[in-house]
Image (cartoon, rainbow, N blue to C red):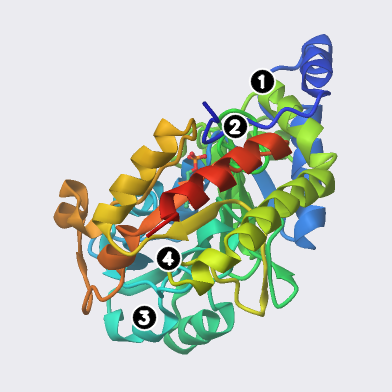
Amino acid sequence: MINFNEPPFVGKELEYVKQAIENKKICGDGAFTQRCNEWIEQAMGGGKALLTTSGTAALEMAALLSGLQPGDEVILPSYTFSSTATAFVLAGARLVFVDIRPDTMNIDESKIELAITDRTRVIAVVHYAGVGCDMDAIMGIADRYGIKVIEDAAQAVMSTYKGKPLGTFGDFGCFSFHETKNYSMGEGGALLINDSSYIESAEILREKGTNRSKYFRGQVDKYTWVDYGSSYLPSDMNAAYLWAQLEIAEQINNNRLDCWARYHEAFAPLEEAGMLQRPVIPQECSHNAHMYYLKLATLASRTEFISHLKENGVQATFHYVPLHSAPAGRKFGYFAGADEFTTLESERLVRLPLYYNLKKDDQETVINAVASFFKGK
Ligand SMILES: *Cc1c(COP(=O)(O)O)cnc(C)c1O
């Protein structure tokens, strides 16, 4: 069976984890965490990066730092992972779901304004598949209404919009280093703070409500409990695992892009024949090959397609069931406007295996299994 995903492993991970242990510093904010933070800041061209225990934790921090009050509203797509939504629910907000664009599966920027009320405080955008939302339009709306923007860039490390890295447009960028993402530490993530006025409160929030980060920098001579907080620091052993990959991020990115391009080329004739649709990358976006997906004509043909692949030794999956139709989505929010594309498009989408070092032979098997499904149709 060709797995849908295999966690990235590049070779140096064990050596670095061993080093972390030998450093006698396996809790948070050790040498490897520092290196990962610096790498993120450099790759993003600025901002302050804080490694977290997950992408969800980074979103939670962003939600809490944005100062939401009960009854405040957050605009987000319904086509996303539960983390994007639940982070804001924990912060006390009400969710307002907006439709997606059928081409990129990202929030439809032209439908955001209709969803704004006098309680709207945040627009949370998701860069689906590592392909950027229309950030010019979205930042324009946010500026006009004085609303914050939080980017769920969990899938978007190393992607850009008009040459600027995703995660650097809003007040906060949230990244994930889960094993299914391009760079991994098992479970982990990072918060990128683009407005420096949030740095001190973010450090306090992440360190159990204490000013311990200031203490470590020698800025105060003892640390104390100063505000509410939680524990969002990952172990330095996990950071060591991640560092091995960030060190060769370019190589991982190119390997994934090659793999993505092979799929894209192989399926062009099937798209021309009207059998399926391939992903669309807008001109202003450069992506990171986070995933490769296809769209079938209907939900029924997708179901048939996934079982055909399985019979041919290929594990393919679909996601997401739109959040507004889920029990928690109905409880915590509502869909603003018409669901023109969210449900329809989500039911057609299927993801193919794509991971670092997916073998060419295995990719051929996937491509042949796809082709054989459409033969004679
Ligand atoms: C993976 C993912 C998350 C959550 O990241 P974790 O590190 O698993 O908590 C959030 N949003 C999106 C869009 C994701 O793909």
Q: Earlier in the sequence, mark 4 or mark 3?
A: 3
Q: Nearer the viewer, mark 2 or mark 3?
A: 3
Q: Is residue 175 above or below residue 238?
A: below
Helix, strand or loop at label 4? It is loop
Helix, strand or loop at label 3? It is loop
* Disc 4 packing (10 Å; few <14; some 14–19; many ≥20): some
Q: Earlier in the sequence, mark 3 or mark 1?
A: 1
Judging depth in this view, the residue of 89 and 113 nearest the camera is 113
Helix, strand or loop at label 1? It is loop
Q: Give the CA separation, mark 2 to mark 1.
A: 8 Å
Q: Earlier in the sequence, mark 2 or mark 3?
A: 3
Q: Nearer the viewer, mark 4 or mark 1?
A: 4
Which labelled disc corresponds to residue 27?
1
Which labelled disc corresponds to residue 233?
2
Q: Give the CA separation, mark 2 to mark 3.
A: 34 Å
Q: Quick one: which residue is furthest to the front in this view? A: 376
Q: Position of residue 291 (x, y in %)?
A: 57, 51
Q: Give the CA separation, mark 4 to mark 3.
A: 32 Å
What's the amino acid at mark 3? Answer: Ile
